[in-house]
Image: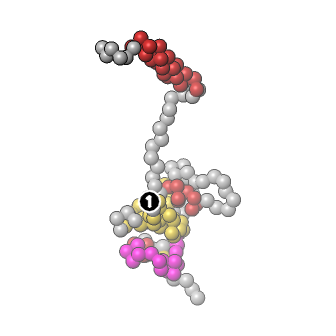
Amino acid sequence: MNPGINYKRLVPPAVVLAVIIIALMLTRSVMFGGARPISLTAADPLVGRISQALATGNSTELAVPGRDYTLKNTTYFEDKTWVVTTIAPVGGSSYSGMVVLHKSDKVYDVVLGPGTAFSSTELGTLPNNIVLYIKAHGVVYDPVI
């Protein structure tokens, strides 16, 4: 033992600290109502933006993936910078729509749609490979002037 340290003086503070830690551990369940902490699974990075895009008017409730719609035929382009996906309503109550998203600063933003048809002029700012993909799915029309 080191002759310069009085170990007997360190025991009371160490005991107090141990009692505080044990008390906090025991009261944790009381503080949280006896509930165990939960963890959520990671959401698809597209669904938040799509749910926002589907909101209409003054609606305060967003569409819920799995309950209101599902994503089908999701196709990524240009190293996952662009995404084209189909939004299918659950229960088949209406037509499926298509949406195009672009990733910027690690977040996807809707740049086209959701919709069931797009004019050829709306496709002007999209990369050519995405335009060809959308046209191949028959959702492009030429506006009558």
Q: Amino acid at mark 1?
A: Lys
Query: Would residue 109 be seen by someone viewing this image from the given angle?
Result: yes
**Nearer to me, 104 or 14:** 14
Q: Residue at x 49, y 35 (%)?
A: 38
Is residue 31 located in the magenta-colored stretch of the structure? no
Question: What range is drawn magenta here?
Answer: 116-130
Q: Residues within 10 Å of mark 1 (few under 14, many from 20)?
A: few
Residue 27's spot in the image, x, y percent?
Answer: 55, 21
Query: Would residue 22 be seen by someone viewing this image from the given angle?
Result: no
Q: Residue furthest front?
A: 4
Q: Is residue 3 above or below residue 115?
A: above
**Nearer to me, 30 or 45:** 30
Total marks drawn?
A: 1
Quadrant position of the C terminus in the picture? bottom right
Q: Residue at x 64, y 61 (%)?
A: 56
Q: Residue furthest left?
A: 1
Quadrant position of the N terminus in the picture? top left
Residue 119's spot in the image, x, y percent?
Answer: 52, 78
* Secondary structure state at the residue bearing disc 1: loop
Residue 37's spot in the image, x, y percent?
Answer: 50, 32
Is residue 127 located in the magenta-colored stretch of the structure? yes
Q: Residue at x 69, y 59 (%)?
A: 58
**Nearer to me, 52 or 104:** 104
Q: Residue at x 35, y 68 (%)?
A: 78
Residue 94's spot in the image, x, y percent?
Answer: 56, 61
Q: Is residue 80 above or below residue 126?
A: above
Tell me which colouring the rendered structure shows.
secondary structure
Instruction: Determine which residue is flagged by label 1.
Output: 106
Q: Residue furthest top?
A: 8
Q: Residue furthest bottom?
A: 145
